[in-house]
C-alpha cells in the first residue's frame, strides 16, 4: 500500500469522525501535523509487523532446507507426469 493512500485514508477517517462528533454536539478531535505523522507511523509499523509475522520466515538451517524441499515438491507436482497414461490399463 502506498503512503499516499494511507495518509488519505487516515485524513478521511478523522474528517468523518469529526463530522459525526460535531453533529452529535460533542467536542471534535483536535489534531496537529505531528499527531497525524505519529498516527501514520504507528499504522505503518503495525501493518509491516503483521505482514512480516504472517509471512514464512525461516531462520534456522533446518527450516531453510525444509523450504527447499517443499519448493521442489511443489515444482514436481505442477509438472505433468508422462506415466499416467501408461498406468491407465488397457481400455
Image: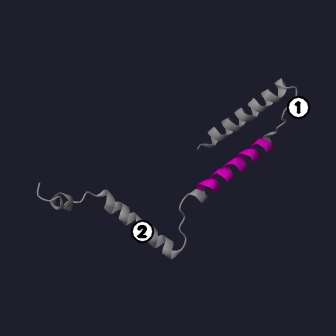
Residue at 24% x, 60% y: name it: 81
Q: Relative to 9, say whether 71 is above or below.
A: below
Quadrant of res 20? top right
Quadrant of res 71? bottom left
Q: How far is disc 1 from disc 2 in space, using C-alphas?
A: 57 Å
Residue at 60% x, 59% y: name it: 53
Q: Relative to 12, say whether 66 is above or below.
A: below
Neighbor class of circle 1 (other Cα within 10 Å; few <14, some 14-19, many 20+) is few
The quarter of the picture where the C terminus appears is bottom left
- In the image, taking residue 74 as reference, residue 6 lies left or right, namely right
The answer to whether residue 8 is magenta is no
What segment is highlighted magenta in the picture?
Answer: 34-51
Residue 18 image point, x, y percent: 80, 30
Residue 57 image point, x, y percent: 54, 64
Q: Secondary structure at mark 2?
A: helix
Circles 1 and 2: CB atoms closer than 8 Å: no
The answer to whether residue 40 is magenta is yes
Q: Secondary structure at mark 1?
A: loop
Instruction: Name the disc covering residue 68, or none.
Output: 2
Instruction: Name the disc covering residue 73, or none.
Output: none
Residue 60 image point, x, y percent: 54, 74
Residue furthest toward the top?
A: 23
Q: Main secondary structure of the magenta part?
A: helix
Instruction: Name the disc covering residue 27, or none.
Output: 1
Amino acid at each position: 500500500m502506498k503512503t499516499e493512500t494511507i495518509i488519505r485514508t487516515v485524513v478521511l477517517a478523522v474528517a468523518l469522525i469529526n463530522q459525526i462528533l460535531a453533529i452529535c454536539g460533542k467536542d471534535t478531535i483536535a489534531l496537529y501535523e505531528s499527531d497525524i505523522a505519529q498516527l501514520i507511523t504507528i499504522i505503518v509499523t503495525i501493518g509491516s509487523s503483521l505482514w512480516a509475522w504472517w509471512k514464512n520466515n525461516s531462520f534456522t538451517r533446518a527450516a531453510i532446507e525444509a523450504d527447499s524441499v517443499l519448493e521442489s515438491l511443489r515444482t514436481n507436482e505442477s509438472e505433468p507426469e508422462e506415466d499416467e497414461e501408461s498406468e491407465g490399463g488397457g481400455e
